[in-house]
Image (spheres, rainbow, N blue to C red):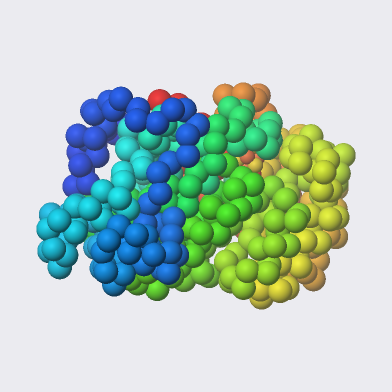
Amino acid sequence: MTSSPRRSQVAGVRATGTGEAAAAQWRPSLPLAAGSKPPQHLADLAPAERRAAVAALGEKPFRAEQLARHYFTRLTTDPAAMTDLPGPTRDRLAEALLPTLLTPVRTVTCDAGETRKTLWRGLDGVLVESVLMRYPGRTTVCVSSQAGCGMGCPFCATGQGGLQRNLSTAEIVEQVVAAERTLAAGDLTPDGSADPAHVSNVVFMGMGEPLANYRAVIGAVRRLTDPAPHGLGLSQRTVTVSTVGLVPAITKLASEGFSVRLALSLHAPDDELRDTLVPVNQRWPVKQVLGAALGYAEHTGRRLSIEYALIDDVNDQPERADHLARLLRGRPAHVNLIPLNPTPGTSWQASAPEGQREFVRRLRLAKVPTTVRDTRGREISGACGQLAAVG
Ligand code: SAH
Ligand code: SF4
């Protein structure tokens, strides 16, 4: 469903309960050189590592759990709020393990406030974006895993800027914690009828290729899904990792014992076209990437999601729909068609409505479950492939 531009309201910097407006006006002198690794944060560490880190600071290891509860459950990094910790201890622990990694630069909203894109600045100045979307009965946050992306898909705004650097585990987790704070403050729903008041789904579909930043992404999945107080306590089944198809990393992911959903950005059923739309296909062609992704689906029992951006006269021909159907018929997969979102770098257009309808019809005729994704966030350049993080 395309949201009506009339409902769009680019709000610029909004005053919120999270102090975003004040932070947005604050122009920090950047404490780290461009491309530097961010400092260590509690959310980078597994529970045992946190205890060790706290002990190394001369504090009792059980303090680690108290600190984690403040961060993941109470959503605070403010030592003054940590009244169950002795004064000097809170200051020392918060300073060492809860640095502010991302500062909000700008927030824009549309869909009557139910879609909200935030531009963040890292300590070294890199810019990334995340998008929070409220739907009936669920609230999804779309997170970035890298600043920029090195995969060079020509239809994607993120790819057009190249890769700046990988995000750390904590920088990824921070995007979700910030979303939780927004929801807790009631800022996503101006009418105050927040439903639900927590993030229910996380999709790694923001900037970057998550499997090119494997270790940090796996750490983030653990922090998001570890039960409280060690993590945010989300169900793994509501986390989706989207990839262009880095085959060794897909195979490795299958061995982690997760039940997260995998989305494969296929965009073409044949190597000739996919080589141009998704350049990494030259390394791992369709047959190999689909084999690995379906292997993941069989191993985890989670249906594979095939992402396919419909581009007018490029990949939306009826014979390509039939080819895709032959690849997927009877397999544990469903197709999620994404009407191409406009990006500055290409003149490609989304498929015409008849082309899209015919594509859907042919897939369904072959009994391949098919849905068309809504274009949430398009008018604030917050939809799939539009995140470019321009300050
Ligand atoms: N790098 C990962 C995840 C981020 S992109 C990946 O490519 O899968 C998230 C999704 O948006 C992917 O399916 C991607 O192919 C799609 N996408 C990129 N640019 C797009 C555009 N202009 N219109 C529609 N979808 C796009
Ligand atoms: Fe990177 Fe995904 Fe964009 Fe391709 S579509 S350039 S992999 S973010």
Q: Residue at x 41, y 68 (%)?
A: 47
Q: Place residue 49 in its image quadrant.
A: bottom left
Name the residue nearer the viewer: 134 or 161: 161
Can residue 11 be seen here? The reply is yes
Q: How many marks?
A: 0
Would you place residue 364 above or below residue 323 in this image?
A: below
- 350 to the left or right of 377: right
Q: Residue at x 81, y 66 (%)?
A: 329
Name the residue nearer the viewer: 242 or 346: 242
Would you place residue 47 above or below residue 145 in this image?
A: below
Residue 326 at what x, y percent from top left? Answer: 85, 60
- 158 to the left or right of 126: right
Q: Residue at x 24, y 35 (%)?
A: 23
Looking at the image, in which quadrant does ligand 2 appear?
top right
Name the residue nearer the viewer: 153 or 377: 153
Q: Residue at x 19, y 52 (%)?
A: 91
Can residue 179 be seen here? The reply is no
Name the residue nearer the viewer: 64 or 285: 64
Residue 375 at what x, y percent from top left? Answer: 51, 44
Which quadrant of the rendered structure holds the C terminus? top left
Residue 68 at what x, y percent from top left? Answer: 31, 64
Residue 26 at what x, y percent from top left? Answer: 24, 28
Q: Place residue 146 in its image quadrant.
A: top right
Would you place residue 40 above or below residue 312 in this image?
A: below
